[in-house]
Image (spheres, coloured by chain):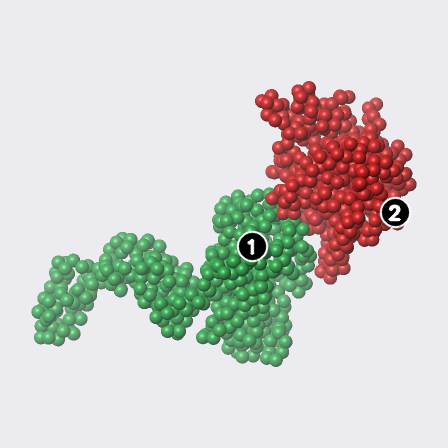
Amino acid sequence: MSDLTRLTAVDIAKRISDGDVSAEEVTRAHLDRIAAVDGKVHAFLHVDADGAIAAAQAVDARRARGDELGPLAGVPVAVKDVLTTKNVPTTAGSKILEGWRPPYDSTVVERLRDAGTVILGKTNMDEFAMGSSTEYSAYGPTNNPWDLGRIPGGSGGGSAAAIAAYEAPLAIGTDTGGSIRQPGAVTGTVGSKPTYGGTSRYGLIAFSSSLDTPGPCARTVLDAALLHEVMAGHDWRDSTSIPQPVPPVVEAAKRGMTGDLTGVKLGLVTEFGTGEGAEPGVLAAFNDALAALTKLGAEIVEVSAPHFQYALPAYYLIAPSECSSNLARFDGVRYGLRVGDDGNRSLEEVMSLTREAGFGPEVKRRIMLGTYALSSGYYDAYYGQAQKVRTLITQDFNQAFEQVDVLVSPTTPFVAFPFGSRTSDPYQMYLADLFTIPTNLYGGPGISVPCGLSDGLPVGFQIMAPTMADDRMYRVAAALESAVGTLTPPSLEG
Amino acid sequence: MTTTTLPDYDAAVAAFEPVIGLETHVELGTNTKMFCGCPTDFGGEPNTRVCPVCLGLPGALPVANKAAIEATIRIGLALNCSIATWCRFARKNYFYPDMPKNFQISQYDEPLCVDGYLDVEVDGRTVRIGIERVHLEEDTGKTLHVGGATGRIHGATESLVDYNRAGIPLVEIVTKPVPGAGALAPEIARAYVTELRDILRGLGVSDVRMEEGSLRCDVNTSLNRPGEEWGTRTETKNVNSLRSVERAVRSEIIRQAAVLESGGRIIQETRHFSEETGDTRPGRSKEEATDYRYFPEPDLVPLAPDPQWVEELRAALPEAPRVHRKRLQEAWGLSDLDMRSVVNAGAVELIEQTVAAGATAAAARKWWLGELARRANEDGIELSAVGATPAQVAELQTLVDGGKLNDKLARVVLEGVIAGEGSPTAVMEARGLAVVSDTGALTAAVDEAIAANPDVAAKVRDGKVAAAGALVGAVMKTTKGQADAKTVRELILERLGAN
């Protein structure tokens, strides 16, 4: 195995910039790694080797000309298959988009290209980002590099596993209810969900428009911050994009790496400790991390967020409602799968057969939930009520942030679970996002950073910050990383 | 099938009171579409004016067009509406292949403009039409059903979709119900759409061409017996001209009266107006109302027009058509009655433009309300669609004034213009219709006429000047009407020494 795949993005960029190694060598090393281990991991749905090598060669040419290279030039990135890539297959993990090659790049991908990063390919995910295990991918699940019999989290399990398996140093995910952070937690990697509107959704195949947020995945906090800065910032093509400068996340990560958190107040949400809560091993690792942060000078303050208990039900009304509308366009008329068009069937029948064959069980479940919740006569009781809960949760966050700088919690209540153990009961699957969903409803940023192991499996520590104060969570995350270190999964060889 | 005998219109409105309501869709004339940068011009090869956004491709997002929002606010202001200080777009969800996303971005319970009115004049009285709302939405694509006999989806072998129109900004203007119209309901409906069209044209927000679909009108009609509650309404679509607005209301009143008189009940449904037959046919039934599952569009931020901006737009509104007409009436020196016939003929703007092109108001009015109105009426079309432009009419009048055409020849030339043969001058020359003013040629014709009618010539010589008419007629006959009658008469009197 090549050393190059073990490096951080920061180191790769420096070596390329210094001329120690070419971008093409770095890319080939990662393509080799993918060829060697992805049969076991199945992190990728599509590897764009030609495109990646061409992009790497372009960086090498620019360097040869003496052009100034950006901080991530030549660094390989894996992109979740929910973001459009021009002429490169984009499926959102669904059969209904099998073979579709978008005619345009998403804004995030465009910014990655502009920054000279090298896009290796598209990563596996739960269909249309609905799920917490990748078991709902139409193309088969991704296996967790820590234990190939366990889930890598979801929906962005492919991106997290690709990083954990050293197939890529960086990856892009999208987080609607925890789809970056929970996979980060269960694969021992860093996953960051920026402030909603801090990263552009243009070209992100929508699941829930008011919640979807693209963000970075990496093996270190600083790498995540660098990727965050490259991908974030106002985009006129997304009306919900915030017209403000990107918070100084790289600077904050570097500050956190010094290991000093003097005067920083961490809020513990009282209500997270009650009810279903986290499993003991997760709680133990979390408490050890809290102790470590206290040693760095942080102060722990207990705060109340009385409406967090309604976050999960509110989320499962809002997200399905929006998805029922967003996914209506997949009807076989214009692109993607078309079933039953034999000249004898009506348009309605072809649309219906296409959607029946093209969507998986979880997508259908959520479309039905959402269609019901938006129906005349039920709207006020369901969608309308959920929006009110959302407002109350936002108030809880605002009040908490008057007392503390950030809120902290375990990222997810349990470590990576075995395949098939939660698919029979949707509610058990939905619990994976118990601690991550409130942040999505509020619209603020959240990051998951590894904090230790439970029974040999990674545990994630979540830090939540006020909207457009993403830098705060990077500082705390980097400080925690400096205290507990990064995690290395068992070897996939042999 | 039972046939009901249709009562005549007078009987229908004697027995029932109609309540009407109008929903008008206006395609805005912005340069680009509502939520993307694609051009909006009419025509173009199918599916060439499209992009990921208006095709609704996965991942694409809408960005609201500020020019369209401005135009909508100006329409709202011109219709005396309140402008919302905060409102949202909403998604209207339903499956149809001409809708790229299978939902339409529209407005639901938070329209941009609410609660206005428009005063229209009908039969010398002013009727105030309440405006419920003015909102902004995106247009759909166009579906073409090929292979069937009807052009409808049933029986078609293929359905083709053109998305060039998808995403063009569309303003919907909805009136409040208009009760108490009585027998004048059809005329009020027409007067409203006419007035609205003139306002929209004055604002410069749309080319308001009903035949091209940039102004579309749905007419709601219900009947009730005096003193009873309002009846069930029908919605008539495919009303594509001002004339059709009037005809559609009239025919729907007659039809509903027949149903009610025979003890039947009106079904709430969409009906289609037929230009050919002048009546309405049932479309899809609305008995089971479609659930559009409206919810606020999460891809767009709320609209909060700055009140100061709204006031600036209000201050810059053009003169209202009513005020404008009053001014024209004075300038043209017309009585109220005369002005009303100009308005009813749809000739205000045509006359105005003809005058601007150099004709006198009297001459312009004579052509538009005379020969051209007769033609339009014969063909059953709008005056503006008659085939002659104001500039051509002005040119025609110049030829008359310059003595090149007499009145009779001018009518012939006008026919040529309407037939598309070119400008009046071109038609005159091509058809050789100019007045013969060469006195040499005329003198010969006059001498010939005198020689052929010695009795008449004698009478004229004796001082019976009136008898010269017969000689003039003879000359005109030999010159095939191309002589100037006045010149001919002078020549005859001169030759016969009767001057």
Q: Colour of chain B?
A: green
Q: Is residue B442 visible?
A: yes
Q: In the drawing, what numbered circle is on residue A273? A: 2
Q: Secondary structure at mark 1?
A: helix
Badge 1 local density, few (<14 within 10 Å), some, or many (20+)?
some
Q: CA distance from mark 2 to mark 1?
A: 49 Å
Q: Which amino acid does the dot numbered 2 rest on?
A: Gly
Q: Give B222 or A388, whichever is nearer the viewer.
A: A388
Q: Nearer the viewer, residue B252 or A388?
A: A388
Residue A356 locus on image (x, y percent): 72, 47
Seen from the viewer's position, the closer of residues A216 and B410 is A216
What's the residue at 67%, 60% (across, down)? Answer: B290
For mark 2, does the 10 Å Cα neighbourhood hold few (<14), some (14 to 19), or many (20 or more) residues?
A: few
Q: Position of residue B160 (x, y in %)?
A: 56, 48
| Amino acid type assigned to the residue bearing label 1 in the image | Ile
In the rendered image, the quadrant that contains the N terminus of chain B is: bottom right
Q: Are marks 2 and 1 on the same chain?
A: no
Is residue A490 toward the left or the right of residue A383 in the image? right
Q: Is residue B58 left or right of residue B120?
A: right
Chain letter for mark 1: B
Q: Which chain comes out red in the rendered image?
A: A
The reply to whether discs 2 and 1 touch (Cβ–Cβ < 8 Å) is: no
Q: Secondary structure at mark 2?
A: helix
Quarter of the image holding residue B179?
A: bottom right
Residue bearing mark 1: B69
- Please give the chain letter of the residue carrying mark 2: A
Residue A216 spot, x, y in % from top left: 72, 36
Residue A374 position, x and y percent, is 72, 56
